[in-house]
Amino acid sequence: DIPMAHVAGILLLTSIAIGVYFRLVVFTGQPAATVKTLAALAMTLVISALFAAVSAWAIAIISITPVSGMTLTTLIIAAVVLGQGLSMAGPEGMLATLLVGGVVCTALSMTGSMVTLLKLGYWVGGTPRKIQLSLIAGSALAAVTVTAVMFLFAHTQGYIATPLHPDPMPAPQANAMAAVVRSTLGAVEAPWFLYGLGAVIAVLVEMTGVSALAFALGMYLPLELNSPILAGAVVAWFVRRSGRESEALLKARNDRGTLVASGLIAGGALAGVLKGVTDLLQEWTGWQLYDFQNDGWAGNWLGIAVFVGLGIAVYLDAKRAKVEDPNHTSHTGKEGDS
Protein backbone atom coordinates (compact mmCIF):
# COMPACT_ATOMS: atom_id res chain seq x y z
CA ASP A 1 0.00 0.00 0.00
CA ILE A 2 0.95 3.65 -0.27
CA PRO A 3 2.55 4.53 3.11
CA MET A 4 0.10 6.25 5.43
CA ALA A 5 2.47 9.21 5.78
CA HIS A 6 2.18 9.77 2.04
CA VAL A 7 -1.60 9.34 2.19
CA ALA A 8 -1.75 11.94 4.97
CA GLY A 9 0.40 14.30 2.90
CA ILE A 10 -1.87 13.91 -0.15
CA LEU A 11 -4.91 14.48 2.07
CA LEU A 12 -3.32 17.65 3.48
CA LEU A 13 -2.53 19.01 0.01
CA THR A 14 -6.03 18.18 -1.20
CA SER A 15 -7.56 19.89 1.84
CA ILE A 16 -5.47 23.01 1.24
CA ALA A 17 -6.53 23.08 -2.42
CA ILE A 18 -10.21 22.74 -1.49
CA GLY A 19 -9.83 25.41 1.21
CA VAL A 20 -8.16 27.84 -1.20
CA TYR A 21 -10.91 27.26 -3.75
CA PHE A 22 -13.62 27.82 -1.16
CA ARG A 23 -11.95 31.01 0.08
CA LEU A 24 -11.09 32.61 -3.27
CA VAL A 25 -14.12 31.50 -5.30
CA VAL A 26 -17.03 30.52 -3.09
CA PHE A 27 -16.73 32.88 -0.12
CA THR A 28 -14.96 35.78 -1.76
CA GLY A 29 -16.60 39.08 -0.81
CA GLN A 30 -18.51 37.45 2.04
CA PRO A 31 -18.24 38.81 5.58
CA ALA A 32 -16.07 36.59 7.79
CA ALA A 33 -15.00 34.70 4.66
CA THR A 34 -12.10 32.91 6.35
CA VAL A 35 -14.30 31.61 9.18
CA LYS A 36 -16.88 30.35 6.71
CA THR A 37 -14.14 28.71 4.63
CA LEU A 38 -12.72 26.86 7.62
CA ALA A 39 -16.18 25.78 8.76
CA ALA A 40 -17.11 24.50 5.29
CA LEU A 41 -13.77 22.71 4.92
CA ALA A 42 -14.03 21.06 8.35
CA MET A 43 -17.60 19.98 7.62
CA THR A 44 -16.54 18.55 4.26
CA LEU A 45 -13.69 16.51 5.73
CA VAL A 46 -15.68 15.19 8.72
CA ILE A 47 -18.71 14.15 6.66
CA SER A 48 -16.47 12.60 4.00
CA ALA A 49 -14.63 10.53 6.61
CA LEU A 50 -17.83 9.33 8.27
CA PHE A 51 -19.76 8.55 5.10
CA ALA A 52 -16.71 7.02 3.38
CA ALA A 53 -16.66 4.36 6.10
CA VAL A 54 -20.34 3.67 5.43
CA SER A 55 -19.70 3.51 1.69
CA ALA A 56 -16.78 1.10 2.13
CA TRP A 57 -18.82 -1.14 4.42
CA ALA A 58 -21.76 -1.18 2.02
CA ILE A 59 -19.58 -2.09 -0.96
CA ALA A 60 -17.78 -4.81 1.01
CA ILE A 61 -20.97 -6.40 2.34
CA ILE A 62 -23.70 -5.89 -0.27
CA SER A 63 -21.74 -4.42 -3.25
CA ILE A 64 -24.09 -1.40 -3.32
CA THR A 65 -23.49 2.01 -1.81
CA PRO A 66 -26.23 4.66 -1.42
CA VAL A 67 -24.17 7.56 -2.78
CA SER A 68 -27.23 9.59 -3.78
CA GLY A 69 -28.89 9.26 -0.38
CA MET A 70 -25.75 10.17 1.55
CA THR A 71 -25.12 13.12 -0.77
CA LEU A 72 -28.63 14.46 -0.20
CA THR A 73 -28.12 14.03 3.55
CA THR A 74 -24.86 15.99 3.24
CA LEU A 75 -26.67 18.78 1.40
CA ILE A 76 -29.26 19.06 4.17
CA ILE A 77 -26.56 19.16 6.87
CA ALA A 78 -24.46 21.68 4.92
CA ALA A 79 -27.49 23.86 4.21
CA VAL A 80 -28.42 23.95 7.89
CA VAL A 81 -24.85 24.75 9.00
CA LEU A 82 -24.20 27.38 6.33
CA GLY A 83 -27.70 28.83 6.31
CA GLN A 84 -28.61 28.81 9.98
CA GLY A 85 -25.18 28.80 11.59
CA LEU A 86 -23.26 31.09 9.24
CA SER A 87 -26.18 33.17 7.91
CA MET A 88 -25.62 32.32 4.27
CA ALA A 89 -28.54 32.26 1.84
CA GLY A 90 -29.34 32.91 -1.78
CA PRO A 91 -27.10 31.92 -4.69
CA GLU A 92 -23.88 32.15 -2.63
CA GLY A 93 -25.18 29.79 0.03
CA MET A 94 -26.53 27.40 -2.59
CA LEU A 95 -23.20 27.32 -4.42
CA ALA A 96 -21.28 26.65 -1.21
CA THR A 97 -23.70 23.88 -0.20
CA LEU A 98 -23.53 22.22 -3.61
CA LEU A 99 -19.73 22.28 -3.60
CA VAL A 100 -19.59 20.70 -0.14
CA GLY A 101 -21.98 18.03 -1.36
CA GLY A 102 -19.98 17.60 -4.55
CA VAL A 103 -16.73 16.95 -2.68
CA VAL A 104 -18.44 14.45 -0.36
CA CYS A 105 -20.18 12.73 -3.29
CA THR A 106 -16.88 12.39 -5.13
CA ALA A 107 -15.18 11.00 -2.03
CA LEU A 108 -17.95 8.42 -1.59
CA SER A 109 -17.78 7.37 -5.24
CA MET A 110 -14.00 7.02 -5.07
CA THR A 111 -14.31 5.00 -1.86
CA GLY A 112 -16.70 2.59 -3.54
CA SER A 113 -14.36 2.24 -6.52
CA MET A 114 -11.38 1.69 -4.24
CA VAL A 115 -13.01 -1.05 -2.19
CA THR A 116 -14.35 -2.79 -5.30
CA LEU A 117 -10.93 -2.79 -6.98
CA LEU A 118 -9.18 -3.91 -3.80
CA LYS A 119 -11.60 -6.84 -3.58
CA LEU A 120 -10.80 -7.79 -7.16
CA GLY A 121 -7.11 -7.19 -6.58
CA TYR A 122 -7.14 -9.54 -3.61
CA TRP A 123 -8.79 -12.27 -5.66
CA VAL A 124 -6.40 -12.02 -8.61
CA GLY A 125 -3.26 -11.10 -6.68
CA GLY A 126 -3.09 -7.44 -7.67
CA THR A 127 -0.85 -4.87 -5.98
CA PRO A 128 -2.81 -2.47 -3.73
CA ARG A 129 -0.34 0.36 -4.29
CA LYS A 130 -0.76 0.23 -8.06
CA ILE A 131 -4.55 0.13 -7.65
CA GLN A 132 -4.42 3.22 -5.44
CA LEU A 133 -2.15 5.15 -7.82
CA SER A 134 -4.35 4.19 -10.78
CA LEU A 135 -7.43 5.52 -9.01
CA ILE A 136 -5.69 8.80 -8.17
CA ALA A 137 -4.72 9.23 -11.83
CA GLY A 138 -8.19 8.16 -12.91
CA SER A 139 -9.82 10.75 -10.66
CA ALA A 140 -7.83 13.53 -12.33
CA LEU A 141 -8.84 12.28 -15.78
CA ALA A 142 -12.48 11.89 -14.72
CA ALA A 143 -12.56 15.46 -13.38
CA VAL A 144 -11.79 16.72 -16.89
CA THR A 145 -13.94 14.33 -18.91
CA VAL A 146 -17.03 14.48 -16.65
CA THR A 147 -16.93 18.28 -16.59
CA ALA A 148 -16.65 18.33 -20.38
CA VAL A 149 -19.64 15.99 -20.71
CA MET A 150 -21.70 18.17 -18.33
CA PHE A 151 -21.00 21.24 -20.49
CA LEU A 152 -21.72 19.20 -23.63
CA PHE A 153 -25.17 18.11 -22.44
CA ALA A 154 -25.95 21.58 -21.11
CA HIS A 155 -25.36 22.94 -24.62
CA THR A 156 -26.97 20.19 -26.71
CA GLN A 157 -29.91 19.04 -24.57
CA GLY A 158 -30.02 21.18 -21.43
CA TYR A 159 -31.12 20.16 -17.96
CA ILE A 160 -34.27 22.29 -17.60
CA ALA A 161 -37.09 22.90 -20.07
CA THR A 162 -36.56 26.09 -22.11
CA PRO A 163 -37.63 27.21 -25.60
CA LEU A 164 -34.14 26.23 -26.78
CA HIS A 165 -34.25 22.83 -25.02
CA PRO A 166 -37.90 21.69 -24.93
CA ASP A 167 -36.92 18.08 -24.17
CA PRO A 168 -34.11 18.32 -21.60
CA MET A 169 -32.28 15.44 -19.94
CA PRO A 170 -34.14 14.13 -16.87
CA ALA A 171 -31.10 14.41 -14.51
CA PRO A 172 -33.17 13.17 -11.53
CA GLN A 173 -30.30 13.18 -9.05
CA ALA A 174 -29.19 16.68 -9.98
CA ASN A 175 -32.77 17.93 -9.79
CA ALA A 176 -33.23 16.28 -6.41
CA MET A 177 -30.09 18.01 -5.14
CA ALA A 178 -31.30 21.34 -6.53
CA ALA A 179 -34.70 20.88 -4.88
CA VAL A 180 -33.10 20.21 -1.49
CA VAL A 181 -30.84 23.25 -1.74
CA ARG A 182 -33.58 25.59 -2.96
CA SER A 183 -36.01 24.49 -0.26
CA THR A 184 -33.44 24.90 2.52
CA LEU A 185 -31.63 28.07 1.42
CA GLY A 186 -34.32 29.70 -0.70
CA ALA A 187 -36.97 32.15 0.29
CA VAL A 188 -39.50 29.47 1.16
CA GLU A 189 -39.66 27.54 4.42
CA ALA A 190 -37.75 24.25 4.35
CA PRO A 191 -40.14 21.26 4.21
CA TRP A 192 -38.85 19.61 7.37
CA PHE A 193 -42.12 17.76 7.83
CA LEU A 194 -41.72 16.11 4.43
CA TYR A 195 -38.12 15.17 5.20
CA GLY A 196 -39.21 13.60 8.48
CA LEU A 197 -42.13 11.84 6.80
CA GLY A 198 -39.77 10.37 4.23
CA ALA A 199 -37.47 9.08 6.98
CA VAL A 200 -40.41 7.43 8.76
CA ILE A 201 -41.60 5.81 5.52
CA ALA A 202 -38.07 4.51 4.86
CA VAL A 203 -37.96 2.89 8.31
CA LEU A 204 -41.39 1.30 7.82
CA VAL A 205 -40.45 0.01 4.37
CA GLU A 206 -37.22 -1.47 5.76
CA MET A 207 -39.19 -3.18 8.55
CA THR A 208 -41.39 -4.89 5.95
CA GLY A 209 -38.32 -6.44 4.31
CA VAL A 210 -38.29 -4.16 1.26
CA SER A 211 -35.13 -2.24 0.40
CA ALA A 212 -35.71 1.38 1.40
CA LEU A 213 -33.13 2.47 -1.18
CA ALA A 214 -34.92 0.68 -4.03
CA PHE A 215 -38.26 2.06 -2.84
CA ALA A 216 -36.89 5.61 -2.71
CA LEU A 217 -35.35 5.29 -6.16
CA GLY A 218 -38.73 4.27 -7.52
CA MET A 219 -40.30 7.32 -5.86
CA TYR A 220 -38.15 10.02 -7.44
CA LEU A 221 -36.84 8.52 -10.68
CA PRO A 222 -38.96 9.37 -13.74
CA LEU A 223 -41.04 6.62 -15.33
CA GLU A 224 -38.81 6.32 -18.39
CA LEU A 225 -35.94 5.31 -16.08
CA ASN A 226 -38.02 3.17 -13.73
CA SER A 227 -39.48 1.05 -16.53
CA PRO A 228 -36.17 -0.52 -17.69
CA ILE A 229 -35.21 -1.06 -14.03
CA LEU A 230 -38.43 -3.00 -13.55
CA ALA A 231 -37.81 -4.96 -16.75
CA GLY A 232 -34.31 -5.81 -15.56
CA ALA A 233 -35.71 -7.03 -12.25
CA VAL A 234 -38.13 -9.29 -14.14
CA VAL A 235 -35.24 -10.77 -16.15
CA ALA A 236 -33.26 -11.28 -12.93
CA TRP A 237 -36.27 -13.02 -11.38
CA PHE A 238 -36.42 -15.47 -14.28
CA VAL A 239 -32.65 -16.05 -14.09
CA ARG A 240 -32.82 -16.88 -10.37
CA ARG A 241 -35.66 -19.32 -11.06
CA SER A 242 -34.30 -20.81 -14.27
CA GLY A 243 -34.37 -24.41 -13.07
CA ARG A 244 -33.95 -26.81 -10.20
CA GLU A 245 -30.18 -26.49 -10.17
CA SER A 246 -28.07 -25.92 -7.09
CA GLU A 247 -28.03 -22.61 -5.28
CA ALA A 248 -24.40 -22.12 -6.29
CA LEU A 249 -25.27 -22.42 -9.99
CA LEU A 250 -28.25 -20.08 -9.70
CA LYS A 251 -26.04 -17.55 -7.90
CA ALA A 252 -23.42 -17.84 -10.63
CA ARG A 253 -26.09 -17.16 -13.25
CA ASN A 254 -27.37 -14.16 -11.31
CA ASP A 255 -23.84 -12.77 -10.94
CA ARG A 256 -23.19 -13.18 -14.67
CA GLY A 257 -26.45 -11.40 -15.47
CA THR A 258 -25.48 -8.58 -13.11
CA LEU A 259 -22.16 -8.15 -14.93
CA VAL A 260 -23.89 -8.03 -18.32
CA ALA A 261 -26.44 -5.53 -16.99
CA SER A 262 -23.62 -3.37 -15.60
CA GLY A 263 -22.05 -3.35 -19.06
CA LEU A 264 -25.38 -2.28 -20.56
CA ILE A 265 -25.55 0.63 -18.10
CA ALA A 266 -22.05 1.77 -19.06
CA GLY A 267 -22.81 1.24 -22.75
CA GLY A 268 -25.98 3.29 -22.49
CA ALA A 269 -24.05 6.14 -20.87
CA LEU A 270 -21.38 6.03 -23.60
CA ALA A 271 -24.07 5.99 -26.29
CA GLY A 272 -25.64 9.08 -24.72
CA VAL A 273 -22.29 10.88 -24.77
CA LEU A 274 -21.77 9.84 -28.41
CA LYS A 275 -25.18 11.26 -29.31
CA GLY A 276 -24.26 14.54 -27.61
CA VAL A 277 -21.02 14.70 -29.60
CA THR A 278 -22.79 14.03 -32.89
CA ASP A 279 -25.44 16.65 -32.08
CA LEU A 280 -22.68 19.19 -31.45
CA LEU A 281 -20.92 18.25 -34.71
CA GLN A 282 -24.18 18.65 -36.60
CA GLU A 283 -24.61 22.10 -35.09
CA TRP A 284 -21.06 23.18 -35.90
CA THR A 285 -20.81 21.72 -39.41
CA GLY A 286 -24.43 21.83 -40.55
CA TRP A 287 -24.13 18.24 -41.78
CA GLN A 288 -27.01 15.89 -41.11
CA LEU A 289 -25.06 12.95 -39.70
CA TYR A 290 -28.23 11.03 -38.90
CA ASP A 291 -31.96 11.55 -38.90
CA PHE A 292 -33.33 8.61 -36.92
CA GLN A 293 -36.87 9.09 -35.70
CA ASN A 294 -38.95 6.99 -33.35
CA ASP A 295 -42.32 8.33 -34.44
CA GLY A 296 -45.40 6.31 -35.28
CA TRP A 297 -46.28 2.70 -34.73
CA ALA A 298 -43.31 1.32 -36.71
CA GLY A 299 -40.70 3.05 -34.56
CA ASN A 300 -42.44 2.10 -31.31
CA TRP A 301 -42.80 -1.56 -32.24
CA LEU A 302 -39.22 -1.71 -33.45
CA GLY A 303 -38.02 -0.26 -30.14
CA ILE A 304 -40.10 -2.73 -28.15
CA ALA A 305 -38.80 -5.64 -30.23
CA VAL A 306 -35.18 -4.63 -29.69
CA PHE A 307 -35.80 -4.11 -25.96
CA VAL A 308 -37.44 -7.52 -25.54
CA GLY A 309 -34.71 -9.15 -27.61
CA LEU A 310 -32.08 -7.56 -25.39
CA GLY A 311 -33.79 -8.94 -22.28
CA ILE A 312 -33.93 -12.43 -23.79
CA ALA A 313 -30.24 -12.19 -24.76
CA VAL A 314 -29.29 -11.26 -21.19
CA TYR A 315 -31.33 -14.18 -19.86
CA LEU A 316 -29.78 -16.71 -22.24
CA ASP A 317 -26.27 -15.41 -21.62
CA ALA A 318 -26.76 -15.60 -17.84
CA LYS A 319 -27.81 -19.25 -18.15
CA ARG A 320 -24.41 -20.04 -19.66
CA ALA A 321 -22.70 -19.41 -16.33
CA LYS A 322 -21.02 -22.34 -14.61
CA VAL A 323 -19.89 -22.90 -11.04
CA GLU A 324 -16.12 -22.73 -10.69
CA ASP A 325 -14.28 -25.46 -8.84
CA PRO A 326 -13.65 -24.06 -5.33
CA ASN A 327 -10.69 -26.41 -4.82
CA HIS A 328 -8.55 -25.27 -7.72
CA THR A 329 -5.27 -23.51 -6.92
CA SER A 330 -5.13 -19.81 -7.79
CA HIS A 331 -1.99 -18.21 -9.15
CA THR A 332 -1.23 -16.85 -5.68
CA GLY A 333 -0.50 -20.40 -4.57
CA LYS A 334 -3.27 -20.61 -1.98
CA GLU A 335 -5.86 -23.36 -2.02
CA GLY A 336 -9.47 -22.29 -2.36
CA ASP A 337 -8.77 -18.59 -3.00
CA SER A 338 -11.06 -18.61 -6.00
Image (tube, rainbow, N blue to C red):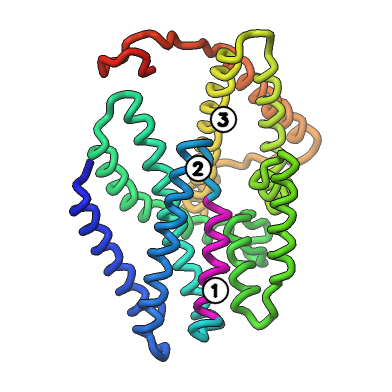
> Which of the 4 quarters of the picture holds residue 73?
bottom right
Q: Earlier in the sequence, mark 3 or mark 2?
A: 2
- Circle 1 packing at 10 Å, graded few (<14), some (14-19), many (20+), is many
Q: Quadrant of the N terminus?
A: top left
Disc 3 marks which amino acid? Ala
Q: Which residues are magenta?
A: 67-83
Front label number (2 vs 1): 2
Where does the C terminus fall, quadrant-wise?
Answer: top left
Identify the residue shown where x is 71% and y is 59%.
Answer: 198
SS state under label 3: helix
* Residue 232 % position (x, y): 66, 31
- Depth check, front residue: 188 or 309: 188
Instruction: Name the residue at 64% across, 67% down.
Output: 179
Amino acid type for the residue under numbered disc 1: Ala
The answer to whether 218 is drawn above or below residue 91 in the figure is above
Q: Which residue is mark 1?
A: 79
* Residue 58 - label: 2
Residue 16 falls in image quadrant: bottom left
Does residue 209 appear anywhere in the picture?
Answer: yes
What is the distance, in whole Å, between disc 3 and disc 1 at their CAs?
36 Å
| Farthest residue, direction right | 297
Question: CA–CA distance between discs 2 and 1?
Answer: 26 Å
Residue sitting at x 54%, y 18% = 252
Determine the secondary structure under disc 1.
helix
Which circle marks residue 261 in the picture? 3
